[in-house]
Image (cartoon, rainbow, N blue to C red):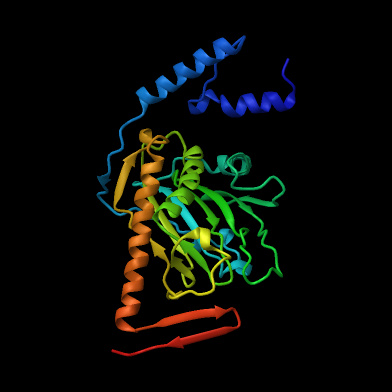
Amino acid sequence: MPDERQREFITRIGDYRHGLFWKEFIDNGELAVAVLEALRDVAADAAPLQWQPVTGEPVVRWRASRPMLTDSSAIYVPVLEAHLAVAESKPLLPVSALRPLASGISRAGRDAGLFSEDAGLALGSDADTAWAVAADSRQAGRSWNQVQRGGPSGVAVDRTGAVLAYAALPRDTLGTLVNDTYLAGQLEPLLRIAHHMLPAEVNEVVPVAGLEPVDRVVEGDPAELGHRSSSTLRMSASKPVRTVPDAKVAAAALPRAIPEIARELAARLMAELRTRRSWLYRFTGLVITHQRPSLVWASQTSY
């Protein structure tokens, strides 16, 4: 007979009310057959990824507009957020389901590695949203060239079915380095946990992503974090970088289509970052170079 923890695990992965089922097996041979059959079923059932235009721009509730998800002690930490928004903003979940949903979010976040096992979590809900937020785990007093990896992370599920997942990006004293491949790799696990928390009633989603703040976000090889001595561009901190919610996909295309969706969102974010950089160079001639954290030279030419 399964013990209490095993029963909880079986319930979590096999909740038939949400379309989750399991099969029993006796030995490794039966397990291998069951796994192969399940993989074939998933491949057969998954819908192809097709981007369709949205008839009306959906309302995306960005993290910055949610006080329960913001951390005033980490306002300078760049945070990447991924949304599975919904085209129709009508309630799908009862308010009574939100409070217990917060516990499910925290468990899913730990299972997915978004929250470390020792991270303190703040769980909550109101009349519109359930959420789980990890306490800031940044370490103070590090040397100037050491990479910092802690920071805000969390997941929120709205009554409309929309899901937001976010996490801080690694950085050193000079800021954060990003490129298309890196951002896609960071977006993919966020999209996966968002899909995991997506209510079964949602048929179509509008994937969007954002990055904020971007004042010290630079295009480059993230492997160079902690090993560089200069940075050539400083973005404007007044405006976050966000993709436009102009296309929707079938929820049935997930999770197989998540890598492709992550690549598209990353390409959109990087295109906006490059546009912002080009604008700065063209209209301000601004160049900021850091040789050490305590020494900064700046030159600006007006056109």
How many discs mark residues in the rendered view?
A: 0
Which of the two residues, 163 or 153, is positioned nearer the viewer here?
A: 153
Residue located 61% across and 83% down the image: 294
Is residue 250 depicted above or below 25 in this figure? below
Which of the two residues, 104 or 79, is positioned nearer the viewer here?
A: 79
The image quadrant of residue 76 is bottom right
Could you say where residue 292 lies in the image, as x and y percent from the top left?
58, 79
Which of the two residues, 112 or 57, is positioned nearer the viewer here?
A: 112
Q: Relative to 192, is 106 on the left or the right?
A: right
Residue located 37% across and 66% down the image: 273
Specify the quadrant that holds the C terminus: bottom left
Q: Is residue 243 visible?
A: no
Could you say where residue 90 lies in the image, as x and y percent from the top left?
39, 46
Q: Is residue 289 visible?
A: yes
Specify the quadrant that holds the N terminus: top right
Residue located 52% across and 21% down the image: 21
Could you say where residue 257 lies in the image, as x and y percent from the top left?
37, 38
Outermost residue toward the bottom in this view: 302
Which of the two residues, 189 or 52, is positioned nearer the viewer here?
A: 189
Could you say where residue 139 lies in the image, as x and y percent from the top left?
70, 63
The image quadrant of residue 255 is top left
